[in-house]
Amino acid sequence: MTYGIWLILFCFVAGIVAVASNPSPYFAALGLVGAAGVGCAVLVSSGGSFLSLVLFLIYLGGMLVVFVYSAALAADPYPEGWGTRSVFVNAVVFFLVAMALSVLVCGGWYEGSWVGVEEAAGLGMVRGDTAGVALMYHHGGGLLLIAAGVLLLALFVVLELTRGLSRGALRAV
């Protein structure tokens, strides 16, 4: 199980490096979706299957919107792929920096601390991830409404910025 989690975490770092090293929004969005999928696999390996499913569905919906806007604003007829020299050099540098930081940070960690939520809770009738979601909505309902309003405002700002000087039906001819 430990080797599987190591492999999942390695794929997560590779997905993040794929996002950070590529200047093209097409390939960066693909790397971001892959990193989100592998991040949800990390949550599943820890015992949070419901939270992983909800996070993946919400994240994919948000990524679809971001990808559509970035693809509409990108004026790149020939985007740089992962095989080009500059993207490959950036990926190698980012990966080496990530490995150096992980060596510096993980001095006190060991594999015994990777325990699933069901193993740590003892005898319980409710899964840990569903109880956590209910607690989050119970105590954080007001903050959830504020966050939804901020996201709606951000959507209107992005729509206004991408529309440009043409005002639709209200513009002067």
Image: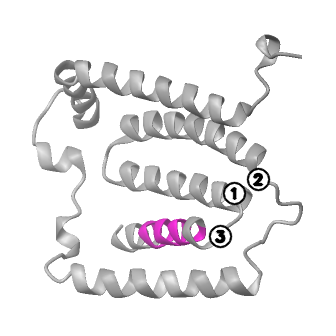
Which amino acid type corresponds to the residue marked 3 in the rendered image? Asn
Give whichever of discs 3 and 2 has the lower sequence position: 3
Q: Are marks 2 and 1 in contact (CB under 8 Å)?
A: yes
Q: Kindly indicate the quadrant of the structure image that contains residue 90.
A: bottom right
Q: Furthest residue to the front?
A: 172
Quadrant of the snapshot with the C terminus: top right
- Left or right: residue 8 compared with residue 162: left
Distance from Cα at disc 2 to Cα at disc 1: 7 Å
Q: Which mark is residue 25?
A: 1
Which residue in the structure is indicated by mark 3?
22
Three-letter amino acid code of the residue under disc 2: Ala
Is residue 151 placed above or below 98 in the rendered structure?
A: above
Please give the residue where the numbered disc 2 appears in the rendered image: 74
Camera-side residue of 139 and 80: 80
Residue appearing at x 25%, y 25% in the figure: 143
Q: Is residue 80 above or below residue 135?
A: below
